[in-house]
Amino acid sequence: MTLSNDAVKSTADDGTTVLRIAGEVDMSNSDSLRKQFVDALDGGARTLVLDLSEVTFFASSGIAALAHAREYGKQSGDRPVHVVASRSVRRSLEATAMDRLLPLHATLDEALAAAR
């Protein structure tokens, strides 16, 4: 696994779950991230905020994991997924038009405000 830190989960009082991911997201860890996204939604999160601001490399498998999180959230009670994106992640999401499907935010505070 090439993540410098596994996703660290913290839950806000309002039912929003934040997953912070740092390092590289690629084929070696994207399945693990997908499972953590699903586990957070299955664990009662009404809204999921993915803080990818410390991600240094974001492969297409990471984009697929985000797409899965979005669809899983929609299918399990219309629970939105918000993304805080580093520059490299933002470029990948814009190049694949995922920025049209997932709300992107510059900071965690902005994402949390939008999630409320």
Image (cartoon, rainbow, N blue to C red):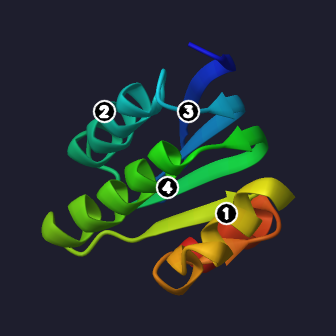
Residue 33, percent across and down? 43, 33
Determine which of the numbered discs, if any, sits on residue 26 in the image.
3
Counting residues from the start of the chain, the first of labels 2 and 1 encountered is 2
Whether 58 is drawn above or below 81: the answer is above
Which of the two labelled residues, at mark 1 and mark 3, occupies the earlier sequence position? Answer: 3
Q: Could you say which disc has been placed on residue 35 in the image?
A: 2
Q: Which residue is mark 1?
A: 92
Q: Give the camera-side residue of 41 and 116.
A: 41
Q: Amino acid at mark 1?
A: Ser
Residue tagged by mark 4? 63
Who comes first in sequence, dot 3 or dot 2?
Answer: 3
- Secondary structure, mark 2, is helix
Seen in the image, is 12 located left or right of residue 38? right
Q: CA distance from mark 4 to mark 1?
A: 8 Å
Residue 60 visible in this rendered orientation of the protein? yes
Structural crowding at the residue carrying mark 3, measured as other residues with C-alpha within 10 Å and reported as few (<14), some (14–19) or many (≥20):
some
CA gap, disc 2 and disc 4: 14 Å
As shown in the figure, which amino acid type bears the numbered disc 2? Lys
**Between marks 2 and 4 in the image, the one whose residue lies nearer the viewer:** 4
Q: Which amino acid type is marked by label 3? A: Asp
Split into 4 quadrants, where in the image is the N terminus?
Answer: top right
For residue 25, what is the image quadrant?
Answer: top right
Name which residue lies at 35% across and 30% down.
31
Q: What amino acid type should be assigned to the residue bearing mark 4? A: Ile
Instruction: Give the x, y percent position of residue 71.
Output: 26, 66
Whether residue 13 is visible here, answered yes or no, is: no
User: Residue at position x 53%, y 86% from top?
Assistant: 100
Q: Residue at x 47, y 30 (%)?
A: 27
